Image (spheres, rainbow, N blue to C red):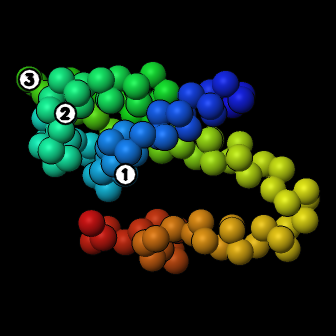
Amino acid sequence: MDSEQVILALAALAQSTRLEVFRLLVKHEPQGLPAGEIARALAVPQNTMSSHLAILTRAGLVSSARHSRSIVYRAELPRFQSVALFLLQDCCGGRPEICAPLIASLTPCCPQDSSTGMPPANIT
């Protein structure tokens, strides 16, 4: 990932509605949400929401797929991971002890099944 792509992603998230949209979509992974539901959930007019979703899509942070008459949006978590890794790549000048608290705070929010390394199937 290059600097321009990271700047585009960060600029897309540097607006309150778009940040709320991204966070909402992360909560609804992997199924995503239709555009109308996103607009209703955040009390944003659909035409305005359409503009916000277009900006997030251009930044590569969300993707869309048509399902019947709806367009369903999903967070692009691998892209977000790439942005975060770009920011942390040279973390603390190669001194991992300085970065340890930051890295510890990035651990998953959901407990993991020790046999699979994945969140338990009953976590929603």
Along the viewing direction, whichever of 81 and 93 lies nearer the viewer: 93
Q: Secondary structure at mark 1?
A: helix
At 49% across and 40% down in the image, what residue appears?
14
**Which numbered disc covers residue 82?**
none
Looking at the rendering, in which quadrant would you find the N terminus?
Answer: top right
Q: Residue furthest left?
A: 69
In the rendered view, does 69 fall on the left or right side of 79?
A: left
Q: Give the number of the disc on residue 35.
A: 2
Q: Amino acid at mark 3?
A: Arg
Residue 81 placed where, x, y %? 58, 46
Q: Residue at left 18%, top 38%?
A: 44
20 or 110, nearer to the observer: 20
Left or right? Give the position of 51 relative to 96: left
Q: Secondary structure at mark 3?
A: loop
Gap in angstroms between the C-alphas marked 2 and 1: 14 Å
Please tell me which residue is depicted at 38% across the width and 45% down the height of the picture: 16
Question: Does 16 sit left or right of 49 as displayed?
Answer: right
Work out whether residue 116 can be spotted.
Answer: no
- Residue 103 in which image quadrant: bottom right
Instruction: Determine which of the numbered discs, if any, sits on residue 69 in the image.
Output: 3
- Please, is residue 51 above or below residue 106 in the view? above
